[in-house]
């Protein structure tokens, strides 16, 4: 029951948090919008599972990176809006930097590897 | 942060549900915008969301501190299960409350009395020094010895001397005169201890010389009581024994050394007469000292002992000089004789607590047996063993916690009661329940809970799920093993009980012997009271004798008085004093041998008033007074010991009594032996005529009055009579002989009763345990017994079998307990009076009591088993 998260566990969880924070940069949004933005901007490559989205949102709120309030949605329904806090903004910068380093490092590794065992498999 | 989260889980969950609801609606609205039907749009939205329950569960788990969560759940569950069996729960809590309460109360006392250091700075440097007596033990120190030690030793920062004394204080403005217990001490006593007066100043060396004006320091309680706590008393003068004393200081309230009853402190040179101050023979005082840092007790003692040995060599044979010095830490000196009883009671109380734990454990095993299937079920459903054990232990801890909370209340009451009624408890004023004690209480509570819970928990959470699920009343295998475990617990319980019973039995027997001791005089209808003739009005022998004869005359004529007499101290009221003597007719015995006997005074009527029998010769006569008083009466013990084959009458004892130079006293009578203390054998004793009227020597008076009826009623008339002669003379210790004896047995009685109460409680607990186990066994075997009866077993046989089943552990426990007692009684030896630690009567009696109680506890279930109706029994499942 516990953590049957995605198979690629921790890294994805980290990136999900980062992406949620990123979507909140332009303005406050509720859960549905956040999921939609991530899906659309990734050209539907990333599908946000609700099973991870809401726990992630609550986790971020718990850490003080987002705050929340109840408001009316675009369709005039009651929805819970999330707002990026100052701490969240700093966290986003930190995570983005880390992510960039990671991507670069992986890219370097993959670049050599891909060349090396390209024919083997 | 995470803790708050934990407690807000439910609110978060509700919010989440709402959030999910709004998500679904948004998604459905979007789908509908894409042209789906309303139903399809909602369906697709749900598909997209997946299982909302999972989302909730994930979040819930995320917000959960799992350890707290499970502990909280266990707690709620345990509380509910316990609530369902209120009888069991109440009994268990009460048992634990008694056990924990008793343990905490005694720990409080032991800690405050024995473990807490004295309320002085660097208490470990403080020591008490004693002159080594002939017995090898420490005895009082002669003043001149002290001054030699003080000037010659280098191991001590300071050394001080003190002795007990007392003063008559006359009221200035019609206040009642009173007798004050006091201490006279060298000026540096307070600085040795490290205590400063709260008002005024301590003594200085200038106060403690012959030429100084008399000064006095008051205890806090006396200052409050007699002077209403008005600080202007400092510098004023009070009259003690008719003499003016300037009040220079008041001691702090916390200062109760050596005894809280002390009211006054007077410089040593003012409280001790000059011949005694310079005497190496007169052993009257106590010495305390503060070791220099880095000097050990044994080093310090060796040094002083060497000094003392020089003194001994210098006076060789000339008189009683101690050859050496013994010492002990001051805290041990203060605690003294109460150490052994306190430790014994502490051990007893821990035994009681252990028995309570075993009993609880036993009860829990019984419950666990009944809940085997539940446990098996939970284990089959995936409950881990740790969780099940934790659940079990939670239950016992919960019981113990409630018991502990109640126990602290019990302890609080018990401590108050103990300090009030335990007469000889030293430092009773320092006994309090404080944070350390509470920590101890919490500690033993958890310990008790875990101890009593762990055994059943381990046993009933084993992996034999299938066996447990199949377990039914007919299959006895597994539960039979549990029954033998319960019997094992019982054996231990009973063994501990036997040890406690034996200890209590020995103390009671000793007490019984003590209270039937013959003092050597009558104790019925005798009233005694004390007064001390001091000051200007009693400076001459004629004044003293005139007062004493007036008292005798007037009291004798009071209605109800059968006989009246005067002495220095009545039998049973203490050692008072001894002195050395030699026998004129036995010259040139080895000078090394120092004979000594207790000394007393008596008037002509004293022995008849106390009904002390005359063995030979005569009592004093009324003409033997003032200068015509070189006569002495001895007791049988002295006569037998020193005049084995001759008539002591007409012989002479040479004693320094009237003056420091020894004089001869003619033996005129031999009287029966009397004991100076109830629990000590009679010693050689000699009486001098009180009517010699020597100031100081014969002025400590106990007036004894034998009456025809209740002696207490005569107290006031006699006091009025005394006030009629001297209104300024305080009278103290107005006690009947029974009360004086009561004082010496009170503590033994108290300790015996406490231990007896603990033993009885354990016996009760053990009996309840035995009853419980056997009842349970019978219930388990109902069907089996039914079958047997159906096959023709006799009721008597069934009864006998069940009884034997229960008595087996009882006898095993008894045997084990008797063996344990043989080892344990060493502990109580020091508290026993003329009782052997292995007293067969006590051991027999304890065995009999245990067998009878165990038999009674087994009888009920056995009887029930034998009365079973076979048809009914076979139908029970």
Image (cartoon, rainbow, N blue to C red):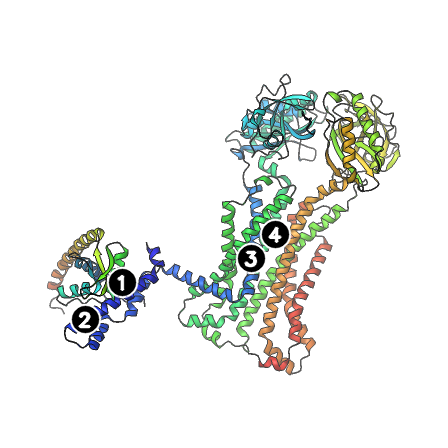
Residue occupied by mark 2 = B29
The chain letter under disc 1 is: A
As measured in the structure, the alpha-carbon distance from the residue carrying label 2 to the one carrying label 1 is 24 Å
Have a look at marks 1 and 4 and say if they share a chain: no
Chain under numbered label 3: B
- Nearest-to-viewer mark from 3 and 1: 1
Location of residue B672 in the rendering, given as x and y in whole percent from the top left corner: 83, 37
N-term mark: 4 or 2 = 2
Query: Mark 1 and mark 3 in contact (Cβ < 8 Å)?
Result: no
Circle 4: is it few (<14), some (14-19), or many (20+) Cα within 10 Å?
Answer: many
In this rendering, the label closer to the viewer, 3 or 4: 3
Q: Alpha-carbon distance for marks 3 and 1?
A: 46 Å
Asked which secondary structure carries label 2, the reply is: helix
Q: How far, Cα to Cα, is label 1 from label 4? A: 58 Å
Contact, CB < 8 Å: mark 4 with mark 2? no
Residue at position x 13%, y 58% from top?
A108
For the residue labelled by badge 4, is the local secondary structure a helix, a strand or a loop? helix
Q: Quadrant of residue B619?
A: top right
Is B692 left or right of A48, judged from the image as shown?
right
């Amino acid at each position: 029951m516990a953590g049957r998260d995605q198979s690629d566990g921790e890294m994805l969880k980290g990136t999900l948090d980062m992406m949620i924070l990123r979507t909140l940069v332009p303005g406050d949004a509720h859960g549905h919008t956040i999921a939609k933005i991530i899906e659309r901007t990734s050209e539907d490559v990333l599908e946000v599972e609700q099973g991870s989205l809401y726990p992630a949102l609550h986790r971020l709120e718990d850490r003080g990176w987002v705050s929340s309030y109840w408001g009316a949605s675009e369709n005039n329904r009651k929805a819970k809006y999330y707002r990026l806090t100052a701490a969240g903004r700093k966290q986003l910068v930190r995570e983005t930097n880390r992510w960039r380093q990671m991507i670069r490092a992986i890219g370097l590794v993959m670049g050599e590897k891909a060349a090396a065992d390209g024919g083997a498999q | 942060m995470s803790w708050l989260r934990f407690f807000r889980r439910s609110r978060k969950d509700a919010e989440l549900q709402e959030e999910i609801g709004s998500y679904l609606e948004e998604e459905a609205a979007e789908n509908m915008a894409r042209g789906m039907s309303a139903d399809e749009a909602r369906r697709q939205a749900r598909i997209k969301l997946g299982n909302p329950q999972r989302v909730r569960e994930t979040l819930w788990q995320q917000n959960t501190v799992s350890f707290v969560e499970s502990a909280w759940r266990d707690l709620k569950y345990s509380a509910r299960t316990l609530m369902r069996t209120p009888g069991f729960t109440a009994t268990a809590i009460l048992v634990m409350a008694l056990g924990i309460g008793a343990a905490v109360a005694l720990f409080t006392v032991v800690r405050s009395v024995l473990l807490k250091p004295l309320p002085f700075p660097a208490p470990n440097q403080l020591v008490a020094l004693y002159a080594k007596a002939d017995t090898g033990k420490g005895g009082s120190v002669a003043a001149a010895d002290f001054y030699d030690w003080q000037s010659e030793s280098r191991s001590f920062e300071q050394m001080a001397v003190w002795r007990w004394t007392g003063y008559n204080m006359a009221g200035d403005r019609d206040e009642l005169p009173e007798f004050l217990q006091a201490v006279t001490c060298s000026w540096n006593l307070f600085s040795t201890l490290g205590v400063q007066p709260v008002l005024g100043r301590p003594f200085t060396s200038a106060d403690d010389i012959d030429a100084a004006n008399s000064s006095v320091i008051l205890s806090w309680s006396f200052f409050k009581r007699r002077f209403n706590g008005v600080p202007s008393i400092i510098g004023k003068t009070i009259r003690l024994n008719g003499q003016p004393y300037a009040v220079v200081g008041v001691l702090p309230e916390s200062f109760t050394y050596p005894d809280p009853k002390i009211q006054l402190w007077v410089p040593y040179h003012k409280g001790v007469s000059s011949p005694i101050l310079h005497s190496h023979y007169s052993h009257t005082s106590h010495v305390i000292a503060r070791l220099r840092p880095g000097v050990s007790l044994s080093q310090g003692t060796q040094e002083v002992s060497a000094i003392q040995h020089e003194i001994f060599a210098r006076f060789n044979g000339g008189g009683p000089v101690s050859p050496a010095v013994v010492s002990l830490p001051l805290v041990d000196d203060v605690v003294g004789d109460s150490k052994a009883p306190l430790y014994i009671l502490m051990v007893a109380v821990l035994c009681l607590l252990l028995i309570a734990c075993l009993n609880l454990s036993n009860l829990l095993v019984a419950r666990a047996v009944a809940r085997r299937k539940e446990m098996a079920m939970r284990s089959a459903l995936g409950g881990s063993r740790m969780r099940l054990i934790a659940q079990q232990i939670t239950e016992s801890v919960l019981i113990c916690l409630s018991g502990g909370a109640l126990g602290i209340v019990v302890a609080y009451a018990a401590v108050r009661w103990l300090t009030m009624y335990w007469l000889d408890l030293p430092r009773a004023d320092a006994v309090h329940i404080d944070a350390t004690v509470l920590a101890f209480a919490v500690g033993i509570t958890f310990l008790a809970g875990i101890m009593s819970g762990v055994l059943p928990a381990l046993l009933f959470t084993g992996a034999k799920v299938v066996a447990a699920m199949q377990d039914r009343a007919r299959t006895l295998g597994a539960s039979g093993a549990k029954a033998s475990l319960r019997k094992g617990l019982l054996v231990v319980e009973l063994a501990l009980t036997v040890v406690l019973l034996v200890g209590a039995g020995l103390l009671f027997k000793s007490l019984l012997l003590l209270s039937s001791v013959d003092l050597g005089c009558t104790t019925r209808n005798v009233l005694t009271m004390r007064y001390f003739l001091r000051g200007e009005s009693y400076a001459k022998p004629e004044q003293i004798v005139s007062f004493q004869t007036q008292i005798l005359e007037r009291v004798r004529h009071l209605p109800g008085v059968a006989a009246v007499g005067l002495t220095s101290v009545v039998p049973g009221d203490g050692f008072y004093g001894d002195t050395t003597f030699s026998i004129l007719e036995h010259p040139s015995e080895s000078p090394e041998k120092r004979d000594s006997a207790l000394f007393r005074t008596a008037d002509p009527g004293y022995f008849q008033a106390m009904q002390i029998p005359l063995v030979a010769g005569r009592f004093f006569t009324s003409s033997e007074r003032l200068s015509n008083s070189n006569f002495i009466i001895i007791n049988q013990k002295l006569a037998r010991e020193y005049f084995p084959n001759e008539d002591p009458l007409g012989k002479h004892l040479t004693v320094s009594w009237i003056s420091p130079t020894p004089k001869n006293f003619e033996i005129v009578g031999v009287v029966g032996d009397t004991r100076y203390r109830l629990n000590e054998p009679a010693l050689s004793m000699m009486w001098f005529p009180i009517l010699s009227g020597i100031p100081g020597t014969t002025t400590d008076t106990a007036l004894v009055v034998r009456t025809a009826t209740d002696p207490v009623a005569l107290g006031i008339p006699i006091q009025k009579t005394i006030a009629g002669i001297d209104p300024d003379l305080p009278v103290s210790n107005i006690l009947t002989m029974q009360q004086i004896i009561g004082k010496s047995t009170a503590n033994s009685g108290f300790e015996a009763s406490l231990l007896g109460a603990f033993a009885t409680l354990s016996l009760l607990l053990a009996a309840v345990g035995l009853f419980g186990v056997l009842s349970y066994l019978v219930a388990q075997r109902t069907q089996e017994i039914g079958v047997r009866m159906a096959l023709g077993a006799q009721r008597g046989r069934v009864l006998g079998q069940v009884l034997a089943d229960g008595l087996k552990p009882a006898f095993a426990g008894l045997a084990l307990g008797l063996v344990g007692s043989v080892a344990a009684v060493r502990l109580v030896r020091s508290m026993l009076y003329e009782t052997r630690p292995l007293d067969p009567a006590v051991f027999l009696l304890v065995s009999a009591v245990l067998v009878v109680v165990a038999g009674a506890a087994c009888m009920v279930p056995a009887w029930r088993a034998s009365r079973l109706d076979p048809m009914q029994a076979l139908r029970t499942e």
